[in-house]
């Protein structure tokens, strides 16, 4: 059991659609375009390092402290938090649900996620029309389905597993998701990456997605998101991320934290 608030040291992931502004924000000079900053992760191979906010002691990987952070036994750290910035369209993609992840991928969870936008005029595409999406996958022609939407700063997009989606250039957001790295690409704009036709078709679901304008609180089956002002006290377990600095604080289940800046709090 921890007796201090923890901080998370981010890791950086290059992407073909990445954005050198992230390299600049985090003073990373020896990498190509960073597309994702994993602010808090217990996913094997991509684990962030935990250290004490007061002591500065290194505690190592989050996966070693699941019960100490969340107060319960779980197959892995349940939440994964990323900062994402783009200069190109992401692939049109879909994520599997928990059943497919367990039965077809030997993973405990699929990937339901939410995007909280940090700038204006973010272009997104999302569709839960299974038949039209299946037809587009098979024909490799998305013209009939692809109808982008603009979302602005502080808007939130909830993307259940099974719903087709993508993100356009010049977008910046915080992504909270189940801890899973399962993505099935359906279309990739001519880039030479693998397309997952059959897996993608099998993963399609007609689930309701949600667009919320400047929500102060947003609850789902897998996570809850709260906007917090400077000086608010929050109780663990959860993850607090400051806007602008993206400093990431891990509040164990037995502790509470008073915010120093405005940000988002993510919890189960």
Image (cartoon, rainbow, N blue to C red):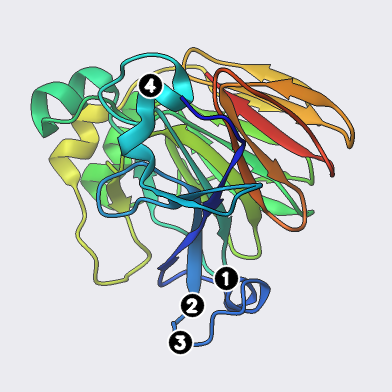
The residue beneath circle 1 is: 87
**Mark 2, other Cα within 10 Å: few <14 / some 14–19 / many ≥20:** many
Return the disc, 1 or 3, that comes first in the chain's sequence. Answer: 3
In the picture of the structure, the residue carrying the numbered disc 2 is: 33
Classed neighbour count for the residue bearing mark 1: other residues with Cα under 10 Å, few (<14), some (14–19), many (≥20)? many
The answer to whether the residues at label 3 and label 4 have Cβ atoms under 8 Å apart is no
Task: Decide which of 61, 112 is in the foreground and name it.
Answer: 61
Secondary structure beneath dot 1 equals loop
Mark 1 or 4: in front is: 4
Closer to the eye: label 1 or 3: 3
Vertical comparison of 97 with 195: above or below: above
First-in-chain label (2 vs 1):
2
Residue 169 appears left or right of 109 = right
Residue tagged 3: 30
> From this viewpoint, is residue 24 visible?
yes
Disc 4 target residue = 67
Q: CA distance from mark 4 to mark 2?
A: 35 Å
């Amino acid at each position: 059991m921890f007796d201090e608030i923890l901080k998370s040291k981010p890791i950086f992931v290059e992407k073909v659609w990445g954005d050198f502004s992230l390299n600049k924000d985090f003073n990373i000079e020896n990498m190509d375009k960073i597309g994702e900053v994993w602010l808090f992760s217990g996913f094997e191979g991509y684990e962030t390092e935990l250290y004490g906010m007061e002591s500065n002691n290194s505690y190592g990987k989050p996966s070693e402290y699941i019960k100490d952070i969340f107060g319960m036994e779980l197959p892995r750290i349940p939440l994964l938090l990323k900062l994402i910035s783009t200069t190109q369209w992401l692939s049109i993609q879909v994520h599997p649900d928990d059943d497919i992840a367990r039965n077809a991928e030997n993973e405990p969870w699929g990937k339901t996620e939410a995007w909280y936008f940090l700038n204006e005029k973010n272009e997104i595409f999302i569709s839960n029309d299974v038949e039209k999406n299946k037809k587009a996958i098979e024909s490799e022609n998305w013209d009939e389905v692809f109808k982008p939407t603009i979302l602005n700063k502080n808007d939130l997009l909830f993307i259940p597993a099974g719903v087709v989606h993508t993100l356009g250039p010049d977008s910046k957001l915080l992504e909270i998701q189940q801890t899973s790295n399962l993505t099935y690409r359906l279309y990739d704009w001519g880039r030479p990456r693998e397309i997952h036709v059959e897996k993608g078709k099998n993963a399609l679901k007609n689930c309701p997605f949600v667009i919320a304008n400047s929500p102060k609180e947003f609850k789902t089956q897998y996570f809850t998101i709260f906007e917090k002002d400077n000086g608010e006290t929050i109780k663990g377990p959860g993850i607090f991320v400051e806007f602008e600095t993206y400093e990431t604080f891990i509040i164990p289940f037995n502790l509470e934290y008073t915010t120093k800046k405005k940000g988002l709090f993510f919890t189960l």
